[in-house]
Amino acid sequence: MAAQQQLLALMSSASGHNNNNSPEPLYDLSLMAVVNGLDCKVPTLERISKLPELPRNLLIDVYELMSQREDLKDTLLEELSNLDVFRPLVRYTSARGKLLRIVAALMASNKTLPHRLSEAYVGRYAVSQTEAQYNEEADGDGDKAGALATAPVAGAEAGAGAGAGEAAALLPQIDYDKTQTIDIAASCLSHMTLNDKQTAAGAGAGDGAAGAQSAAESVPMETLPDEDIIAIDLGLRLGSFLSVAGWMQESISVLSCLNERLKRMRPFKDELVLRLDCLQRLLYAESSHCNFKMAQKTFGELMELNGRLTNAVPAALIAMAYTQISSMYFARNEYNNSHMWSVQAMRHLEMSAPTRVAIDVLRQAAKACVVKRDFARANLLICQAVRRAREQFGPNHQKYGDALLDYGFFLLNVDSVFQSVKVYKEALAVRRGIFGNMNFHVAIAHEDLSYAYYVHEYSTGDFSFAQEHVDEAVHIMKNLVPSNHLMLASAKRVKALLLEEIALDKIADGMGDDDLLDQSEELHNFALQLSLEVFGEVNVQTAKHYGNLGRLYQTMNRFEEAERMHQKAIKIKTDLLGPYDYEVGLSIGHLASLYNYQMKKFRQAEDLYLRSIDISLRLFGRSYSGLEYDYLGLCHVYETLHEFEKYLRYAHILENWQLLRGQNITQNKSSYPAIELDYTIDQVKTKFFSMNVKRVPTPPEPSKN
């Protein structure tokens, strides 16, 4: 109360120092007066310790001002590292953006608040080895049939040996109501209709596992110890906050700890919902951090729960769980599985789903459609996600930045490269505004923008912007992840591509630079070896690395090695993606170039060019940018072979392509213009599931004449 009275008194006195009596300036003056009166001296520290007594809306503003003062950052770090101080703030969803900026400001000064928070949570709520062993022994002594029926959730009550005084001491020093602590899956439970709840109440009747689940749901959650309830509430919120803020390893630590604790709690109502919620959040963090071994284990636990789902589980939560599974497969380049799970997520997406959930489901489904080359569906989904994110959260929100990044990915893949660069630039600006510079999410945005610049400037050879952003991505990743991390390898892959192009330009100018090519080879081999370790040989990402090495060896005049690399890439991509995928066409075109310009295998080059052209026309149409290289290559083949009729034919096709391409650029035309209409979720689903699946017909045999 003392802190509140002090702030109110300052608000009152501030009006005497400013002629503008409007509330906002008075409030700002009061905040500044409070923060300016703080320092690191002992008397002031006592006042700082009382700041958490302020209402949350005032407290978050005081802390944000403190985060802008270098001399107060250590003090602020100590305050926020206290879980009992941080918990009310992380539960205050209206101030999420401010809390993210506070964390970013502290991290900019190397004040590792995320690590401190995850350590504090695990230190307080981790299930001890002794307790775990006791629970396992207790399970073994119980009824065997009952133990089997409730195996995923069995165990004695966590912390049962603690006294009432110990439990009370763990509670934050604020007004506390057990019944209002759990915000499950973005309030999914609150969106259940009365009919849903009545149906859920009757779910699980029967014998065996279903009967055990019904018995478990009959135990109210409110009967759990206070410590368990706080552990659940704080674990879900803190784990999600840390992943949103870009601190994946810390998020994994918190959510893994909570998952183990949930598995060892006595059965209670909504246990299935909470475990599913915890696991889907954990899977997101693990997949984003490329920790696929842990993600596979989490996926296994999700699959075990998936077989026990009833109407008691909100559809929105199921949609999110399936979305995270799709995201995991996407990160592993297993596109068929990613697409399958995203479709399942779309089936469970309902009108009542929270907006955040709807946006995330639409985004991931759009990405899965992009890699399956189902661009019409992808355009529908990503445009709806971007629109919802902007209208619901505004242009400076993290969710809008996420949607923009995925929209940039879509545009790049449909050959709208200039628009893609613009969207990626906006996405990077949004993320930097929220997270600062030294952040995982910001590094990803730098890398994506760098690659878009690389594609955009490929014909001009000016890679200065691309190099600037990839250097920043590598710099950030080096500070955040281990040296053998996949995300660092991904950024280095883009850097290797740029070094190769810069070296080529120097060679063309008569200034050969073997050092740049050697650097590029080292980076490509680093990325390839890591991909082989994580994904194995038969993976799209591994195939891409083989293809990149093939192009590099072509530049380095190591033609036989280049041929082997391209052939490996084509085989792997064809086996995984089918013979008419964009990636297959890309690698075929690269091998055609090698045969044409270096190895003089002109008939083989001709066949490959025709295959590449056929794939490009099927996927992108007559104005696709990549067609230029294939048409030029064919002209060179026919000129060399003195087949002038064919040469003139493709020279004419190339001329028409240039006219068409120029018109599209001048008029800013796109094969997939943005969908401006605002559809309901039901309308989106109807359109999504009613669109005709694009069938790829069998192409004619390439001409041998």
Image: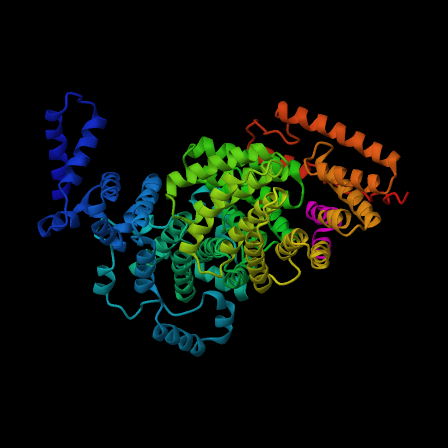
Give the x, y percent position of residue 504. 61, 46
| Residue at left offset 66%, top offset 31% | 671
Residue interval drawn in magenta = 571-589
Q: Is 652 part of what is drawn in magenta?
A: no
| Residue at left offset 52%, top offset 33% | 422
Outermost residue to the front: 510
Near-viewer residue (581 or 362): 581
Q: Quadrant of residue 408?
A: top right
Near-viewer residue (637 or 557): 557
Left-right relation of 93 to 518:
left
Outermost residue to the top: 19
| Residue at left offset 20%, top offset 23% | 22
In the picture, the quarter occupied by the C terminus is: top right
Near-viewer residue (65 or 496): 496
Give the x, y percent position of residue 590. 71, 48
Q: Mostly what secondary structure, the magenta segment?
A: helix
Give the x, y percent position of residue 414. 64, 37
Left-right relation of 26 to 433:
left
Q: Is 583 part of what is drawn in magenta?
A: yes
Residue 685 in view: no
Outermost residue to the right: 705
Q: Examine the rendered structure and indicate whether residue 641 appears above or below residue 479.
A: above
In the picture, the quarter occupied by the N terminus is: top left
Q: How many marks?
A: 0
Residue 608 in view: yes
Outermost residue to the left: 43
Left-right relation of 196 to 596:
left
